[in-house]
Image (cartoon, coloured by chain):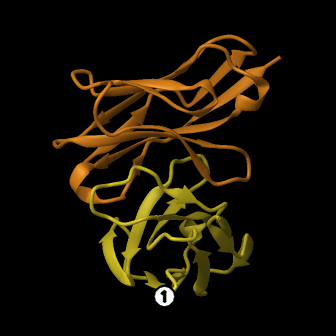
Chain colours: A yellow, B orange
Amino acid sequence: ETGVTQSPTHLIKTRGQQVTLRCSSQSGHNTVSWYQQALGQGPQFIFQYYREEENGRGNFPPRFSGLQFPNYSSELNVNALELDDSALYLCASSMGLAGYTGELFFGEGSRLTVL
Amino acid sequence: AQSVTQLDSQVPVFEEAPVELRCNYSSSVSVYLFWYVQYPNQGLQLLLKYLSGSTLVKGINGFEAEFNKSQTSFHLRKPSVHISDTAEYFCAVSEEAAGNKLTFGGGTRVLVKP
């Protein structure tokens, strides 16, 4: 069974640039969620994708967008980067929505530094 | 809106001593509760969860937690810690109707000393 994998693991960008982060979900999982974890804080929910549709969004501006592909892998795109976007971005996969299963499987994250 | 408060940002503890990490939540609806652990430079791993039933929940690595609805708490305990338990611990809550969206607390860093 393949776990959740994220790429890249680390990257550095400058203010105003755009970034794309990628996530491959665990085998058999059709739901992907993205979380932002700023240094010293708990993860914050960005959005969730279920069967290629956005299904729930946290308090993040529209410059944070995403995609889910037919193989259930996902991308997180952030436009017009700001210094405060520096964080660890975590992807988590799960199976389904109805009757909450109770467990998210997290990747190791992509650490973004914005200079 | 739901929220989670972890009362201790850092807990130093000696090896083989017990540890308790406190977590309180607020929500206007029924919730599911979780504890996750994050080792350095890694993602989050589920320790245990409360969905329904018995309020005492046992998880991996000897951890357990007790759900107290009247006090809106879900404290995590381990009777005897090991050096390898040094990590950051996060309490999280999900509203039953919200699918898999989790709201996390700010985390508690546990440092186990020899």
User: What amino acid type should be assigned to the residue bearing mark 1?
Assistant: Phe
Residue B110, above or below B99: above
Q: Position of residue B98 (x, y in %)?
A: 26, 58
**In the rendered image, which quarter is residue B6 located in?**
top left
Residue at the farthest left position: B28
Q: Locate the C terminus of chain B by quadrant.
A: top right
Q: Look at 52% across and 83% down and name the residue there.
A: A77
- Residue receiving disc 1: A69
Q: Is residue B31 left or right of residue A29?
A: left
Q: Look at 28% across and 56% down and name the residue there.
A: A99
Q: Is residue B91 visible?
A: yes
Q: Position of residue B65 (x, y in %)?
A: 45, 25
Q: Position of residue A76 (x, y in %)?
A: 52, 79
Report the front residue among B97 and B52.
B52
Q: Look at 21% across and 55% down and name the residue there.
A: B97
Residue B46, above or below A22: above
